[in-house]
């Protein structure tokens, strides 16, 4: 199995370019199931989750051709299954995003239930009750969701809690429903706005994406589109945190300040110099890091997907800080590994108390999920000596060429077998 070997400590300096957002590209790819014509997607990141989604789409009858970071998606019209099998869903929960578009376009969908994952239970009950509100008959059997509707009918649905995937599934399904759908208490993440933009280019009529209430006028059919995926705010944020941690000077070209506002505010508070320009975001830091707490929340709050990386940063701050995780119930698995590297962190339920600055020392550590892996890499950058991050297949699900980006910034990082 592949590992990442990091020789610390490092100071990161230089310029890197943003990659396309995995979490935006996944629903955009799923939306190609709705199209009657070719969809051309640009700036698609080359990460494992995208390869998995392309395999699923092929299975469902959408052919793809890849030219660098451009992916052409063509509906084949051939008879193909309406089913997302367990083998694919178990490696990537986002396969559940096929449910809404399949059901809306073909009247039937069978998708394996994703089950829990390393960071929490992660039910999809709201996806299902939302589809029921549009007239679908939903059954759970043998570990699969089976949904049917001759034609979905527009309706009103309120999410009891904002869900990113749930909002995306419903947005796609409602675009082909008969009549008007009103979705309330929607997730407001930039990835949802990106999805609505592409659906609109395909002919959908959507108002309010990025706000709590979204109104969709369903269409009889949707065409193709040319669309460019937004930059990956989580990857960009990870490199900005790395720059602060290593007292570096890094420009992330293409990074969008509005998408990263809650992180940039914190980076400013800890004493880093954050400059936003037309080119992207530059962060410089020297001297002490001030401790500042965070509470993860749905957008526009502090993203749970940057919590682990921010906690690694706080191990280097002078004093105590509190990290509160409110989105997922089991998202502190990086803590034990950070502690093994010398961090002083105590957990009490969804609260973590970090005391710093800790002199971290390189160790062999185990990645448990995608973002936890990134936090261990960051810790490795400031640790004395050699850090080996095992199980980096987690990292490869969502970070594009991480080691080459870090090498470009001067870190000594290599991938080993
Ligand atoms: C997406 C992101 C993930 C990120 C998360 C929160 C993708 C592919 N993944 O995941 O990286 O960490 O948003 O920003 O975009 N919930 C329910 N019932 C449901 C659906 C969700 O109770 O039917 C709960 C979840 O258990 C969780 C919370 O809602 O506690 C938010 O989850 P959700 O926004 O749905 O996350 P994902 O879309 O799975």
Image: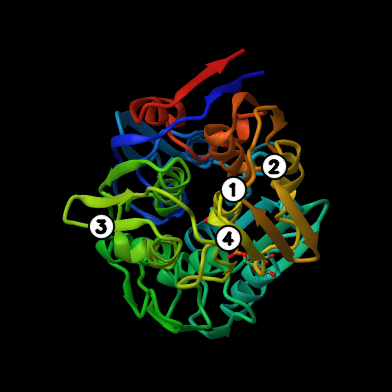
Please name which of the two marks, 4 or 3, marks the residue nearer to the observer.
Answer: 3
Q: Which mark is residue 338?
A: 2
Marks 4 and 1, Cα distance to the nearest angstrom? 14 Å
Secondary structure beneath dot 2 equals helix
For disc 4, the marked residue is: 304
Q: Earlier in the sequence, mark 4 or mark 3?
A: 3
Q: Is residue 52 visible?
A: no
Disc 4: residue Cβ within 8 A of ligand 1's nearest atom: yes
Q: Earlier in the sequence, mark 3 or mark 1?
A: 3
Tell which of 283 and 144 is nearer to you.
Answer: 283
Q: Is residue 69 above or below residue 357?
A: above
Q: Is residue 231 left or right of residue 332?
A: left
For disc 1, the marked residue is: 312
Secondary structure beneath dot 4 equals helix
Tell which of 355 and 380 is nearer to you.
Answer: 355
Marks 3 and 2, Cα distance to the nearest angstrom? 30 Å
Q: Which mark is residue 50?
A: none
Query: Image point 63% across, 64% down: which residue?
Result: 321
Q: Earlier in the sequence, mark 3 or mark 2?
A: 3
């Amino acid at each position: 199995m592949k590992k990442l070997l990091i020789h610390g400590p490092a100071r990161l300096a230089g310029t890197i370019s943003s990659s396309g957002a995995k979490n935006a590209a996944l629903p955009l790819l799923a939306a190609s199931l709705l199209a009657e014509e070719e969809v051309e997607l640009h700036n698609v990141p080359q990460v494992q989750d995208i390869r998995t989604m392309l395999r699923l789409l092929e299975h469902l009858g959408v052919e793809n051709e890849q030219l660098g970071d451009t992916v052409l998606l063509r509906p084949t019209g051939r008879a193909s299954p309406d089913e997302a099998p367990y083998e694919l869903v178990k490696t990537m929960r986002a396969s559940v995003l096929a449910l809404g578009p399949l059901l809306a376009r073909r009247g039937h969908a069978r998708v394996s239930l994703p089950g829990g994952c390393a960071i929490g239970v992660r039910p999809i009950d709201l996806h299902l009750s939302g589809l029921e509100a549009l007239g679908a008959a939903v059954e759970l059997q043998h570990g699969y969701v089976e949904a049917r509707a001759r034609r979905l009918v527009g309706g009103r649905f309120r999410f009891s809690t904002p869900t990113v995937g749930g909002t995306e599934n419903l947005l796609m399904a409602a675009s082909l429903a008969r009549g008007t759908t009103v979705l309330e208490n929607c997730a407001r993440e930039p990835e949802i706005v990106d999805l609505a933009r592409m659906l609109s280019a395909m002919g959908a009529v959507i108002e309010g994406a990025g706000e709590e209430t979204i109104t969709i006028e369903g269409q009889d059919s949707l065409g193709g589109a040319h669309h460019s995926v937004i930059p990956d705010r989580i990857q960009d944020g990870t490199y900005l945190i790395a720059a602060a941690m290593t007292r570096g000077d890094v420009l992330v070209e293409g990074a969008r300040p509005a998408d990263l506002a809650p992180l940039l505010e914190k980076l400013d508070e800890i004493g880093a110099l954050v400059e936003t320009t037309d080119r992207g975001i530059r962060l410089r830091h020297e001297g002490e890091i001030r401790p500042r707490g965070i509470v993860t929340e749905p957008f526009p709050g502090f993203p749970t997907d940057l919590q682990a990386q921010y906690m690694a940063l706080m191990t280097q701050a002078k004093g105590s800080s509190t990290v509160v995780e409110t989105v997922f119930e089991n998202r502190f698995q990086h803590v034990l590994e950070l502690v093994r590297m010398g961090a002083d962190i105590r957990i009490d339920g969804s609260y973590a108390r970090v005391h710093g600055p800790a002199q971290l020392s390189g160790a062999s550590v185990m990645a448990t999920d995608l973002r936890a892996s990134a936090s261990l890499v960051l810790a490795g950058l400031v640790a004395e000596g050699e850090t080996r991050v095992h199980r980096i297949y987690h990292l490869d699900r969502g970070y594009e060429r991480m080691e080459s980006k870090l090498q470009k910034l001067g870190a000594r990082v290599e991938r080993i077998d």
